[in-house]
């Protein structure tokens, strides 16, 4: 079996998608501190330029705008990275959106957008990444999933389904990618203190800051683990919930997520969007 590859700054560039805010932004800053040249991608050019100016360390930030939902744009962007700046040794595919879904008020656009960004966006980056890394004989890719991918959660039908698909996809691809020297990992955080998570409608036990999340992720990237999950006292508990009979599972989660009855009874819902009118990115 091919030896497991662990990327280091001397091996090449790091690429972080969805780096304009939240976990992606914090991870990019942390990688710069570790000495990486980090290519950051998002649709918000101004926020990426701000990140470029605020990041400090022996590494540096390269800003390249891109939309992960456009497969041709991602192929073009990766070709431009390697032609103009160098080989991508490490990629963190982080871009994502959180759009709540209620079963008694279904909206197709929430599913379409969630699947396009959270799942399709990863695939659009993964396909050209694997081709480029395969030609080099090594590489490391980390896919951002979530504890929401472990099981069905209230108001998480679109988001959780997309994150569960990423876990399954990563598990399946690992068998083949191991054999060609490409290391694949999946990141499953619990609740992280981002703007989107704060408006998700859930209680947020074991909340961690974006800085702590970036430290845990970067430590996991240096480890031999397939799954990077934190805080374990919470994420392992969520995993254990899945062994409960469905009757107990549904009753327990319905009790743990208060406030949904008020929404169902006609309380107006607040529109979930950023100051630019676009859905907020989050894990």
Image (cartoon, rainbow, N blue to C red):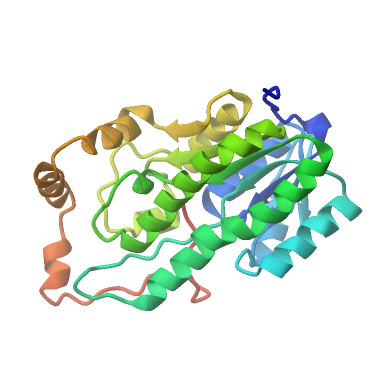
Residue 184 in sight: no
The x, y position of residue 210, in whole percent, is 50, 42
Quadrant for the N terminus in the image: top right
The x, y position of residue 153, in whole percent, is 26, 52
User: 12 left or right of 160?
Assistant: right
Residue under the point 30% across and 73% down:
270
User: 133 left or right of 236?
Assistant: right
The x, y position of residue 112, in whole percent, is 44, 72
Q: Quadrant of residue 237?
A: top left
Q: Residue furthest right?
A: 84
Q: Quadrant of residue 10?
A: top right
Residue under the point 37% across and 56% down:
161
Residue 176 in sight: yes
Residue under the point 44% across and 52% down:
165
- Front residue (pair 78, 1): 1
- Front residue (pair 93, 34): 93
């Amino acid at each position: 079996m091919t030896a497991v590859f662990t990327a280091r700054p001397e091996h090449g560039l790091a690429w972080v998608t969805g780096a304009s805010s939240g976990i992606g932004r914090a991870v990019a800053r942390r990688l710069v501190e570790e000495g990486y040249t980090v290519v950051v991608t998002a649709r918000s050019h101004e926020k990426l330029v701000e990140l470029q100016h605020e990041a400090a360390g022996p590494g540096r930030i390269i800003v390249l705008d891109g939309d992960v939902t456009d497969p041709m744009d991602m192929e073009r962007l990766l070709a431009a990275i390697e032609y103009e700046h160098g080989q991508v040794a490490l990629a963190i595919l982080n871009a994502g959106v959180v759009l709540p879904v209620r079963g008694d008020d279904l909206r197709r656009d929430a599913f379409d957008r969630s699947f396009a960004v959270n799942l399709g966006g990863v695939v659009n980056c993964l396909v050209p990444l694997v081709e480029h890394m395969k030609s080099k004989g090594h590489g490391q890719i980390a896919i951002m999933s979530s504890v929401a991918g472990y099981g069905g959660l209230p108001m998480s039908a679109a988001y959780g389904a997309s994150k569960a698909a990423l876990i399954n996809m990563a598990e399946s691809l690992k068998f083949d990618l191991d054999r060609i020297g490409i290391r694949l990992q999946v990141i499953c955080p619990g609740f992280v203190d981002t703007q989107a998570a704060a408006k998700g409608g859930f209680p947020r036990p074991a909340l961690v800051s974006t800085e702590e999340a970036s430290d845990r992720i970067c430590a996991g990237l240096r480890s031999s683990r397939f799954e990077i999950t934190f805080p374990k006292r919470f994420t392992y508990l969520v995993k254990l919930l899945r062994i409960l009979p469905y009757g107990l599972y549904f009753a327990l989660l319905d009790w743990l997520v208060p406030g949904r009855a008020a929404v169902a009874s006609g309380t107006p819902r607040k529109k979930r969007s950023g100051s630019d009118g676009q859905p907020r990115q989050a894990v």
